[in-house]
Structures are given as structure tokens and as C-alpha cells.
Image: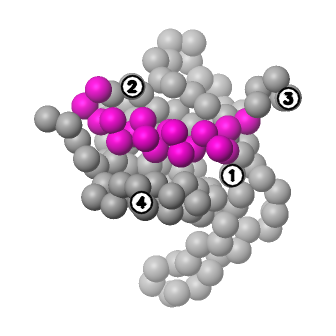
Amino acid sequence: MISRKIKGIGVFTPLMAGGLSDVFETYEKHHPDVSIHIFSGEESELYRELETHKLDIIFLPENIDLSEKTHYNTRMVLLHCAPVVMEYADLPIEPITQNQITQKALWRNSKKSPVIDFFIGYLNKFAVDQSQM
């Protein structure tokens, strides 16, 4: 059975999730039947949830050291921090920086979830040219 759902996308800081809004919007237009859930947590938590298949894609700071044994696909992407709104107080949290921030996207190959491949395809426009780093 092929999954039509992205279980979860993990971000180190909620401000990075806002930087993915263009990807989410484009993705949703082409895949309106796919639901996306966003989670935020510490690096170790995100990595653990990816390991246990509770998250499909995670975004970590570019300088994080990955184990040589990592079996995930990785891509460096440039994202803008974007304001987020606190759910209960309805207060916006504004980023101080207006610069793009390099994040490391990690995901695994999965024949059972081609929707991840489609999402990564939309994410490609944010990819960093490694030869320029």
C-alpha cells in the first residue's frame, strides 16, 4: 500500500518552518490530498524521530555533524526565517535576521512513500550549490 501522507517534517526552530511556506504552498496545489504535519524539537529528538520513522524529513543546522554511518539522503538548503504565531496568545514571533540560513535536510528513501520524493523535488529550488561553499 502506498502512503499518501507525509507523517511529519521536523525543524530545529519553528521560524525555519515558515521558510518552507513556498514549498508547502506549491506542494499542496499539486497534492491536495496529502496532509503535512510539522514538528519542532532539539537535534537529537529530530534525529531519533527520523530513525524511528515518526518523521519523514528533518531540517537541522548546517554545522551539525552526522555519523559516517548515516544512511539518509542529505541536501543543504537555504531558507528564510519567517514569523510564526503563538497558538494560544496569538502573538507573532518575529525573526531578527533577514538573511537566508543554510539548513541540512535529511530524509530516507522509501518506496512506500513517493510523496516524500515529490516534496524533495519541490525543495530543490532551495538547494545550495555545494561548489560555492
Residue 95, position as x, y percentages in the image: 73, 68
Q: Secondary structure at mark 4?
A: helix
Residue drawn at the location 46% of the way across and 54% of the way down: 27
Circle number at residue 132: 3
Which residue position is annotated with label 4?
A: 28
* Cα distance in 3D space between marks 2 and 3: 27 Å
Q: Amino acid at mark 2?
A: Asn
Would you call the spot at circle 3 few (<14 residues within 10 Å), some (14-19), or many (20 or more)? few
Query: Gap in Å between the C-alphas at discs 1 and 2?
Result: 23 Å
Which SS class for mark 1? Answer: strand
Please tell me whether mark 3 sits on a helix, a strand or a loop.
helix
Residue 107 coordinates in the image, percent (x, y): 46, 32
Query: Relative to 64, is 4 on the left or the right?
Result: left
Q: Earlier in the sequence, mark 4 or mark 2?
A: 4
Q: Earlier in the sequence, mark 4 or mark 1?
A: 4
Amino acid at the residue labelled 3:
Gln
Residue 55 at what x, y percent from top left?
Answer: 37, 42
> Do callouts 1 and 2 mark residues in contact (Cβ within 8 Å)?
no
Q: Is residue 6 visible?
A: yes
> Residue 45, can we see it?
no
Q: Amino acid at mark 1?
A: Leu
Instruction: State the CA–CA distance, disc 4 to disc 1.
Output: 19 Å
Q: Most extreme residue toward the left, as rendered?
A: 1
Q: Nearer the viewer, mark 4 or mark 1?
A: 4
Q: Nearer the viewer, mark 3 or mark 4?
A: 4
Residue 50 colored in magenta in the image: no
Q: Which residues are magenta?
A: 111-128
Colouring style: one colour
